[in-house]
Amino acid sequence: MAVVLKSKEEVEKIRAAGRVVHSVLRRCEELCQPGVTTQLIDEEAYRVFTAQGAKGLLKNYPTYRPGEGFPSNLCISVNEVVVHGIADGRVIKDGDIVGIDCGVELDGWCGDSAVTVLVGKVPQEIRKLCEVTRHMLTLAIENIKPGRKWSQVAMLMQNYAQQSGLSVVEDFVGHGIGRKLHEEPKVPNFVSRDLRKNDIELREGLVLAVEPMCNLGLKDVVTLADNWTVRTVDGQPSAHYEHTIAVTADGADVLTDGN
């Protein structure tokens, strides 16, 4: 599929979906306390986005496999789970970090964002993991400009993480977004031979879901028997942050920050 640029009017429609995602994540952060189950958070997310007329995009994904898709409204990934954690009766504990990823569709347009919530007394090295991963996203936002190549931005993100002593997950990357949750192009948080060969030119109207993921230990991950949950191979914690971002004439416009 070719990369589809969005008009200013279409970007505003994506922003409207992004505002719903932002409200869901803020409510989830409030609920993410010791003693609360991930299932309760998932159910509340459904209530929040449904009340705003939006449709969740994660449950039953991928939609071309009815009955076999993802079973939760959110991806809720605790501690060593990198992505695609399934909501269930797991009780959140003091010291946990909880990755929450939400995607919704509103009036035919999609928004996607993720945050890692620090619960209570999180050890300093894990707190640093979250701070560095979040700053990778900030670096991307600050350095997205028309005319640049994505590899220039990805290099900044990767170097910052590795110089901070962290591993960048390479099995999962960001993506284009618009009418569909996952569109072209693929948006890695690292530089590879493939990216150099097929680099992305940043142009006004390009809308990307940028989502750095970092591990405290090795970069390697493994998928569990449920065929969804992805965890670090060494059991070390992982952090994940994401925003939907439009490339503008003079930089970047974050569409999932609630503004």
Image (spheres, rainbow, N blue to C red):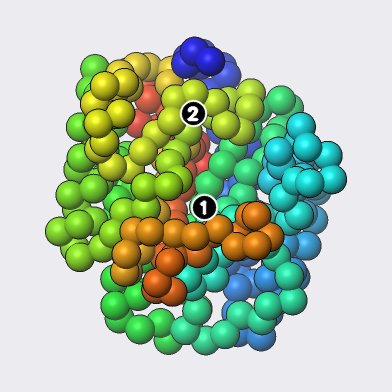
Q: Position of residue 246 (x, y in %)?
A: 43, 28
Label 1 secondary element: strand
Task: Name the residue rendered at 72%, 62% in the picture.
Answer: 42
Q: Position of residue 215 (x, y in %)?
A: 35, 63
Categorize mark 1 by other alpha carbons within 10 Å: few (<14), some (14-19), many (20+): many
Q: Position of residue 31 (x, y in %)?
A: 64, 72
Name the kind of residue labelled 1 in the image.
Ala
Categorize mark 2 by other alpha carbons within 10 Å: few (<14), some (14-19), many (20+): many
**Residue 237 in sight:** no
Task: Name the residue rendered at 55%, 58% in the picture.
Answer: 223
Picture quadrant where residue 78 is located: bottom right
- Left or right, 106 with respect to 229, comes to right
Q: Are marks 2 and 1 in contact (CB under 8 Å)?
A: no
Picture quadrant where residue 27 is located: bottom right
Disc number placed over residue 114 in the picture, else none: 1
- Left or right, 61 with respect to 23, comes to right
- Left or right, 125 with respect to 172, comes to left
Q: Earlier in the sequence, mark 2 or mark 1?
A: 1
Above or below 215: residue 253: above
Disc number placed over residue 53 in the picture, else none: none
Disc number placed over residue 176 in the picture, else none: 2
The residues bearing labels 2 and 1 have C-alpha atoms spaced at a distance of 15 Å
Q: Position of residue 34 (x, y in %)?
A: 60, 84
Name the kind of residue labelled 2 in the image.
Gly
* Front-lying residue, 53 or 86: 86
**Residue 177 in sight:** yes
Q: Which tag is nearer the camera, tag 2 or tag 1?
A: 2
